[in-house]
């Protein structure tokens, strides 16, 4: 009997995986949400995606799918959330369009459960969720608080902002949702006025993470910064100081330090560990527009709709090759929340010039001032948290 399979899956590498996914899809399309777990997506050295099955997980390709319009979104309004930073509050800053708020992520072969803030509070009662990383982690942290708050607006809360640790507590449930700022995850020390990035030391930061019940890590963007944006003066590795080194090699050293710390210090029977994959930027229209050479588009400014398709447009980020290799080498791998491809399709989701208190001159020059790195709230990070919610509870 011939096996009928959708074109979007027919060319996935690996005959076993292709057959398995096709068998799932040709069955009646009733997939219990209780089975929804992630299928980790890897890639080979040629930057093509190579989905791999994880042990004890369903065949739901959670991170492979399309964006579909859904007018029931967003699930909260920026004016109702007490925590959104100005640089993420695009509607407050005058963004004129709102269609970017109306899209839902649809995996290819299953239904993603809608986020339920009350269920989150009940299942996490008395526990701490901590996001650790850079400002993309802060983006996600604020999103999760907004999503929960929308479901329980009368719940007593307490907010404590600090550096590096900020916490938002839902007091009636004893739930703490925290953010720990550590852009490189590994430690940075200041010695004689110089910032030293310790590629093999994470103990300074790590002592603040040990008691969390759920840890979600991210890093990536700061490893490629140069000039005034660079966050260190020297890198130190195995006692040697470097003015610079191959940034991917440095990222790998830092991530292996993080992975070793997780293996040695976190009791995985008590604490769930997630790693959020690289969040893409949209500064180069060549990455998404075939006619970019003749286009007036310079970056994400003016983009109002997602890209279509179910594959990554262009070359897959080199940083993800490093992330993937490190996590696969862990004895007990962190759960890879692979948001890279689905986020790449959302060129419309960035703050652009609606990112805070920009001057009229800055707003008139989006080529230089548009933020095409972070994400509007409400917006894409809400989907990251919907995936985080599904991976945590289903």
Image (spheres, helix red, strand yellow):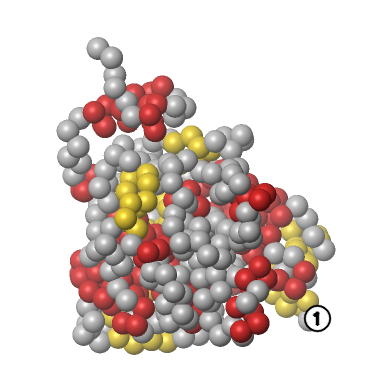
Q: Secondary structure at mark 1?
A: loop
Q: Is residue 335 visible?
A: yes
Taking the image as shown, residue 79 lies to the left or right of residue 166, namely: left
* Residue with the mark numbered 1: 192
Foreground pick, 314 / 233: 314
Residue 227 placement: quadrant: bottom right
Q: How many marks?
A: 1
Residue 233 placement: quadrant: bottom right
Q: Furthest residue to the top? A: 1
Foreground pick, 96 / 357: 96
Foreground pick, 15 / 77: 77
Foreground pick, 358 / 374: 358
Q: Quadrant of the N terminus?
A: top left
Dot 1, how many residues are within 10 Å of its Cα: few (below 14), some (14-19), or many (20+)? few
Q: Is residue 252 visible?
A: no
Above or below, 273 against 356 in this view is above
Residue 251 % position (x, y): 65, 55
User: What residue is at 34 percent from the left and 58 percent from the top?
Assistant: 103
Residue 391 % position (x, y): 32, 53
User: What residue is at 54 percent from the left and 44 percent from the top?
Assistant: 313
């Amino acid at each position: 009997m011939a096996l009928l399979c959708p074109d979007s899956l027919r060319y996935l590498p690996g005959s076993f995986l292709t057959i398995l996914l096709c068998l799932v899809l040709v069955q009646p399309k009733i997939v219990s949400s209780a089975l929804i777990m992630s299928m980790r997506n890897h890639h080979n050295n040629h930057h093509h995606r190579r989905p791999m099955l994880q042990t004890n997980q369903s065949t739901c390709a959670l991170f492979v799918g399309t964006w579909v319009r859904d007018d029931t979104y967003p699930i909260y309004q920026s004016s109702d959330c007490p925590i959104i930073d100005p640089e993420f509050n695009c509607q407050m800053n005058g963004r004129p369009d709102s269609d970017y708020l109306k899209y839902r992520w649809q995996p290819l072969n299953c239904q993603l459960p809608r986020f339920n803030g009350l269920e989150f509070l009940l299942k996490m009662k008395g526990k701490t969720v901590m996001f650790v990383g850079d400002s993309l982690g802060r983006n996600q942290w604020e999103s999760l608080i907004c999503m929960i708050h929308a479901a329980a607006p009368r719940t007593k809360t307490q907010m404590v902002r600090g550096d590096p640790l900020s916490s938002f507590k839902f007091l009636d449930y004893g739930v703490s949702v925290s953010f720990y700022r550590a852009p490189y995850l590994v430690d940075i020390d200041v010695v004689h006025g110089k910032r030293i990035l310790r590629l093999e030391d994470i103990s300074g930061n790590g002592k603040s993470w040990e008691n969390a019940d759920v840890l979600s890590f991210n890093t990536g963007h700061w490893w490629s910064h140069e000039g005034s944006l660079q966050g260190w003066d020297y890198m130190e590795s195995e006692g040697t100081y470097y003015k610079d080194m191959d940034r991917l090699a440095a990222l790998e050293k830092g991530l292996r330090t993080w992975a070793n710390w997780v293996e040695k210090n976190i009791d995985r029977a008590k604490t769930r560990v997630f790693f959020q994959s690289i969040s893409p930027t949209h500064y180069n229209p060549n990455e998404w527009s075939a006619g970019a050479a003749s286009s007036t588009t310079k970056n994400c400014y003016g983009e109002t709709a997602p890209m279509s398709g179910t594959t990554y447009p262009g070359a897959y980020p080199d940083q993800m090759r490093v992330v993937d290799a490190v996590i696969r080498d862990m004895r007990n791998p962190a759960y890879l929340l692979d948001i890279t491809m689905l986020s790449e399709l959302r060129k419309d989701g960035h703050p652009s010039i609606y990112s805070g208190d920009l001057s009229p001159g800055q707003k008139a020059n989006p080529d230089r001032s548009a933020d095409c790195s972070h994400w509007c709230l409400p917006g894409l990070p809400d989907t990251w948290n919907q995936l985080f919610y599904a991976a945590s509870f289903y």
